[in-house]
Amino acid sequence: MEQINTNYYGSNRSEMLEFIPKSSLKILEIGCGEGSFSAQLKSENNETWGIEPNKKSWEIASQKLYKVVNKTLENATEEIPDNYFDIIIMNDVLEHMFYPKDNLKLLHSKLNSKGKIVASIPNFRYIKNLFQIVVKGKWNYTDSGILDYTHFRFFTQKSTLSLFQDSGYEVAMIKGINKTKSVKYFIICCLFSLITLRNQFDTLYLQIAVMAELKNK
């Protein structure tokens, strides 16, 4: 898998399921698209909420989930209950926001006392991306992937950690996901690590998965 799924609205992002605690009963997905991911979490015992600004996707998601708000996060907060959610999910949405830190702070009041945020973010340091920029000298925006033309922000694993910490969260888990299957890029990564005498294996991963909770809960 060398590119992020181009079907943003319909992707089920099944690789993120392992990060969702099975005990989660009140679930909110920001930018839920057509609801394909949260629909996998739906059961008789839980509530799967969503926020989705795209009207066509909202209509589809509304048929799958408990409740979906057809607004941006900034405009939906009054329709989302406070101190309510066990888990808030943000699968590849923070990079589409002008002010991701402010948006993460908006969610403080929506988490219950044990609530967590789970997110995935494209990894700017992905080895294929670095090869195109550093070796080939190319920075071409695309319809999908790390240099998607709709991305306003770019993140590495370290800057992702800082983003959550600066937004008032304690990061419980951060790791790379969707590892490259390319032997060529694996060898380049090994050489890069050897030359710099530092572990550069975070570059093997297309995306970064994060689990965080509020500080001083």
Image: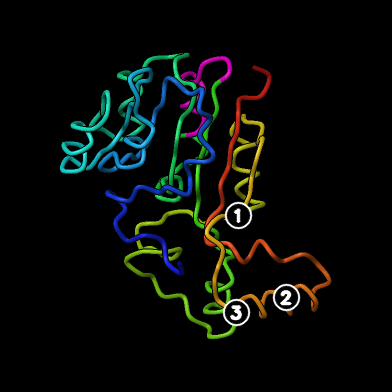
Q: In which quarter of the image is the C terminus?
A: top right
Q: Nearer the viewer, mark 2 or mark 3?
A: 3
Residue that mark 1 sits on: 176
What residue span does the magenta drawing correspond to? 104-114
The relative height of residue 151 versus residue 141 in the rendered view (above or below) is above
Label whose residue precedes the other's in the sequence (2 or 3): 3
Q: Where is residue 167 in the image (x, y as percent from the top left)?
A: 59, 33
Residue at the farthest front position:
44
Q: Which amino acid does label 1 sit on?
A: Gly
Q: In which quarter of the image is residue 135?
A: bottom right
Magenta region includes residue 137? no
SS at circle 1: strand
Residue 183 as seen in the image, left or right of residue 13: right
Q: Which of marks 1 and 3 is in front?
A: 3
Q: Where is residue 106 in the image (x, y as percent from the top left)?
A: 46, 27
Q: How crowded is mark 1: few (under 14 residues within 10 Å), some or many (20 or more)?
A: many
Q: Quadrant of the N terminus?
A: bottom left
Q: Residue 190 carries which label?
A: 2
CA separation, marks 1 and 3? Answer: 18 Å
Q: In which quarter of the image is residue 71?
A: top left
Q: Residue at x 21, y 43 (%)?
A: 57
Q: Residue at x 31, y 28 (%)?
A: 75
Q: Residues within 10 Å of mark 3 (few under 14, many from 20)?
A: few
CA separation, marks 2 and 3? Answer: 11 Å
Magenta region includes residue 111? yes
Q: Residue at x 15, y 43 (%)?
A: 56
Label whose residue precedes the other's in the sequence (1 or 3): 1
The relative height of residue 94 versus residue 165 in the rendered view (above or below) is below
The relative height of residue 123 versus residue 70 in the rendered view (above or below) is below
Residue that mark 3 sits on: 183
Q: Which amino acid does label 2 sit on?
A: Cys
Q: Where is residue 115 in the image (x, y as percent from the top left)?
A: 54, 22
